[in-house]
Amino acid sequence: MGVFIALSIILLWGAHLLWMLFRLPVDPARVWFWLHMLLQAYLFTGLFITAHDAMHGTVSSIRKVNNFLGFAATLLYAGMWYPLLKKNHYKHHLYPATGEDPDYHTGNQNFFVWWFYFMKHYITWYQLGIMALLFNIGLIFFSEVQLIVLWILPSILSTFQLFYFGTYRPHRLPHTPEMGPYKARTQKKNHLLAMVTCYFFGYHTEHHAHPRTPWWRLFQAKGAF
């Protein structure tokens, strides 16, 4: 099931992106344009959530298949390096919301300041090189405006979704006793809202308590809290 869901997200992401590039006019005055932009951003988020599940070994019980899909998802998301993401994510689970957590900002916790710190921590020259190469290949078929608006902008929008529901909202100060050892808040039970907002990752305490539960079963862990 994990492989099927991962492949479905990857294929939906790719098919919708190609449809946008070939068929969707860049026209911000149209509501239809923004609906497709938001959908593509949501599918970008799904790519990263797929990679995240691979980091926890929950996409496939076959290690090579699991890691291949994790690599593929991170590369398609933004040319990111899967081993680095996996190493830092393990630290996040070991030392949540502390100075040793690479996702946590111990300084100014303003949303945009923390988001900038978060992004700077993960952007690498390797990633920028891959994205530049893909962008220039894309220019053979599409215009700069199409690539920036329909491909790059949705990926940036998805970083705000991932950061808000997966890092900022659950782990920001103040840390209260009810947040427990994970220093994490959790979204109130509403499975539809949790799925729409960030693939159930608003159930963040549950994720820390059950890191081996894939995103598509995470709502089941909500009953334990």
Image (cartoon, grey):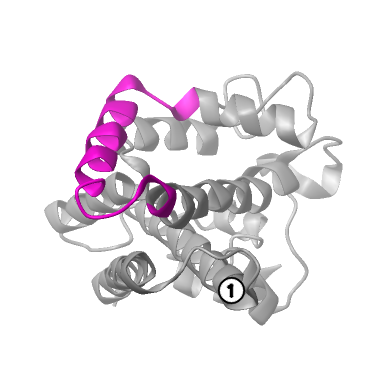
Q: Position of 51 compared to 225: left or right?
A: left
Q: Position of 206 compared to 90: left or right?
A: right
Give the crowd class for mark 1: few <14, some 14-19, many >=20 residues within 10 Å.
Answer: few
In the foreground, 20 or 101: 20
In the foreground, 147 or 98: 147
Q: Which residue in the rendered view is the most extreme toward the bottom?
A: 192
Q: Position of residue 180 (x, y in %)?
A: 74, 45
In the image, which residues are magenta?
121-146
Q: Position of residue 12 (x, y in %)?
A: 33, 73
Seen at 13% across and 52% down, the residue is 64
Residue 172 lies, with reference to residue 185, above or below; the image says above
Is residue 129 covered in magenta?
yes
Q: Amino acid at mark 1?
A: Leu
Q: Position of 37 compared to 172: left or right?
A: left
Residue 171 lies, with reference to residue 127, above or below; the image says below
Helix, strand or loop: magenta stretch: helix
Name the quarter where the N terminus is drawn: bottom left
Seen at 66% across and 76% down, the residue is 223
Q: Position of residue 22 (x, y in %)?
A: 31, 69
Q: Which residue corresponds to mark 1?
A: 35
Residue 148 lies, with reference to residue 30, above or below; the image says above
Is residue 46 covered in magenta?
no
Q: Which quadrant of the view contains residue 118?
A: top right
Seen at 58% across and 78% down, the residue is 32
Q: Circle 1 — which element? A: helix
